[in-house]
Image (cartoon, grey):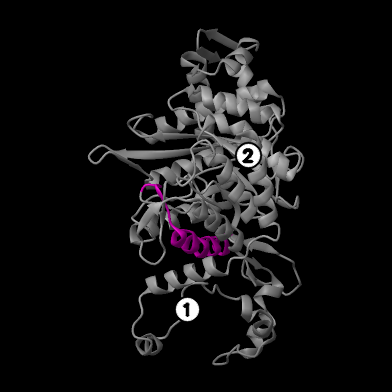
Amino acid sequence: MRLSGIWVKNKVDYSSAVRPVMNVLTEEQIQRVHAYSLQILAETGIRVDSQSALQIFNKAQGVKVDGARVRIQPELVEWAINSAPQSIDIYSRKRDLSFSVGKDSTRFGVGVTNLFYQEPDSDDVTPFMRKHMGIGARLGESLDAFDLVSTVGVLRDVSLEEADLLGTLEMTANTYKPLVLLISDPGQFVPVMDLLEHLLGDLSEKPCAIPYFNPVTPLVINQDTGDKMLAAIERGIPIIYSNYGMAGTTTPINPAGILALLNAELLSGLVLGQLAKPGAAIILGSLPAFFDMKVMIDFFDPHTLLLNAACGEMMAYYQIPHAGTSGSGFGWGMDLPASGILWLNHISACLGKTGLSPFVGGSLSSKAFSPKNVVYSSDIITQARRFTNGFSLNDETVGLDEILDIGPGGNFLSTRSTRMNYKSAYFESQIFPHLSFEKWQENGQPKAEKYLVDRTRNVIEEAKFPEDHDDLIEQGEAFIRTIR
């Protein structure tokens, strides 16, 4: 090694990892966003439609309540930040530790709440059915890139009164991985929690299911969200409190305004959660979408992912666990438009401070669940993690003795380091084979799409049911009959 013109021959363990990182906010900008958010909460405040939530705010110090308008003072926000846990352990339904939000690197999930299912072979869309929920959950179970399964879709082949219950049952029975639950019908939320406790036991001890709630942007804690949130906190279950904004409609059109407003909303949810139960486990995050007024659709823009990274950094500053975007929805299936935003989302999530990225698999403005999207994203996530994990730089990994021994014109085919490491030295796709020009011609010049379809079909066909699948379905259906 050459250092200031001197050859250093003594053994030194540098053992430093070469690892890329991404930061988008300076310390000054973080403080400014925080100050903007505090001003919004103190001067404009929020509207609270949930009477249960309003009662909690009425009893609190540091709150000014005028009808449904609640203005939260900075000292109460600071108290809530300090009261909330800095990390949350999440378990499989076998009660093995799966990951810790707030400590671990980005964790990805399959879902969420699609109305249609997109066939892997034809890209045709059909109404989302109960069998599709099982397919989506088993995809998440089978692919190592995913750490959790979110509510994959809204069942449309069962009665509305049982859709959330049966959907949750299918998810539970088809994966061991943790669940993120989005319950469409407010009246089914408590029954869904009862169903899970009937099947799995106490959800507060080694939690394996995380309910997901959205306030109404801008600045409204609606009745359903407030009531369900408080019901979950009362049971001791970790929750995700995440807002969805559309630039120029429900949020300011400028990214800076979007960040300040959405951050204020998240802090208001944090305050409510801590007032309800100090130390309540809450994960915060935003889905900052944009809105095309010409065609009346919302979508994720590159600035969405920049804002996601900024939100992750705000939560890291607060030491609050984070859940963010998944890049899904763009494109008309797993196509070229979709691939770009997926790549940008997954690699920026891994480079930044995103905690959870729970909603992979949506296409057609997140209305259709695409198994091909899930399978291709698995490949992207594996590569993104490989990139962000970097490599070690030290005496052993450099292998200077080998380099000096081989010398000019030699090769490293049979060196010790090659023999030991060649199997893990490079990424090997589970979808696309390495084909030479000649082999590609010999195989009839196949399209990449063919390999993705084949891989998706194989994963679906080979995905195994959990051993207790049938027993859980039977128990769950029997329980649902008793409460309907």
Residue for point 52% across, 41% down: 163
- In percent of width and height, residue 408 lies at 56, 90
Magenta span: predominant SS is helix
Earlier along the polypeptide chain: callout 2 or callout 1?
1
75 shown above or below 281: above
Residue matched to label 2: 481
The reply to whether the magenta stretch includes residue 383 is yes
The reply to whether the magenta stretch includes residue 300 is no
266 shown above or below 25: above
Pick the front one: 420 or 28: 420
2 shown above or below 171: below
Pick the front one: 419 or 187: 187
Residue for point 50% across, 56% down: 347
Q: Is residue 379 left or right of residue 448?
A: right
> For the residue marked with disc 2, what is the amino acid?
Arg
Q: Is residue 380 left or right of residue 231?
A: left
Residue matched to label 1: 433
189 shown above or below 385: above
User: Bounds of the magenta span?
Assistant: 365-388
Is there any visible trace of residue 319 in the rendered image?
no
- In percent of width and height, residue 119 lies at 40, 61
> For the residue marked with disc 1, what is the amino acid?
Pro
Q: Which label belongs to residue 221?
A: none
The picture quadrant where one finds residue 343 is bottom left
Residue for point 75% across, 68% down: 12
